[in-house]
Amino acid sequence: MLAIGRALMAHPKILLLDEPLLGLSPAYQKIVIDSIREIRAARGITIVIAEQYARPVIPVIDRGYIIENGSAILEGTKEELMGNPDVKSAYFGV
């Protein structure tokens, strides 16, 4: 949270977040995801997130890319990704 706040002090047009949920409890993950939503809405900043734990992130993205072994194997809107059976199986256990 401190790193995100510090980055916002520079008034960026793009905010890059690498594994922002790493090591956080589910409660703090929710706080970070809610903060990302608020930042995007209030400041109109483009936010790029690289995250292995996709479950909490997919609902807040506009567009996503699934990368495997260094190559993008799947891309789409959050609706397309949430509707994809492979994504459901791999990230949501459905």
Image (cartoon, grey):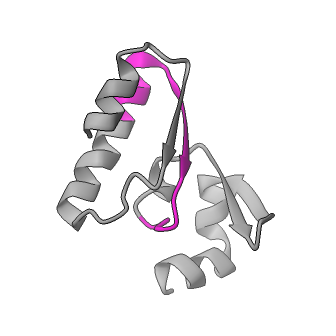
66 above or below 45?
below
Across and down, in percent, residue 47 comes to 53, 35
Quarter of the image for residue 21 reads bottom left
Which residue is rendered at x = 41% and y = 17% of the image?
Answer: 43
Number of marks present in the image shown: 0
Which residue is at the far left? 27
Name the residue at 24% across, 66% down. Answer: 26
| Residue at position x 23%, y 48% in the image | 31
Q: Camera-side residue: 12 or 27?
A: 12
- Side (left or right) of 84 relative to 44: right
Relative vertical location of residue 14 with respect to residue 9 in this rendering, above or below: below
Q: Along the horizontal axis of the image, is 26 left or right of 83?
A: left
The image quadrant that residue 73 belongs to is: bottom right
State the image quarter where residue 82 is shown: bottom right
The spot of residue 7 in percent (x, y) is 40, 26
> Is 74 left or right of 91, judged from the image as shown?
right
- Residue 32 or 76: which is nearer the viewer? 32
Q: Which residues are magenta?
A: 37-55
- Quadrant of the snapshot with the N terminus: top left
Residue at the (50%, 23%) spot, across then down: 45
The picture places residue 48, in percent across and down from the top left corner, at 57, 40
- Considering every residue shown, the one lying at the far top of the view is 11
Instruction: Examine the structure image and report whether residue 40 is included in the region drawn in magenta.
Output: yes
Vertical placement of residue 28 versus 16, above or below: below
Asked whether residue 91 is drawn in magenta, I would say no
Q: Identify which residue, 18 or 39, lies in the foreground.
A: 18
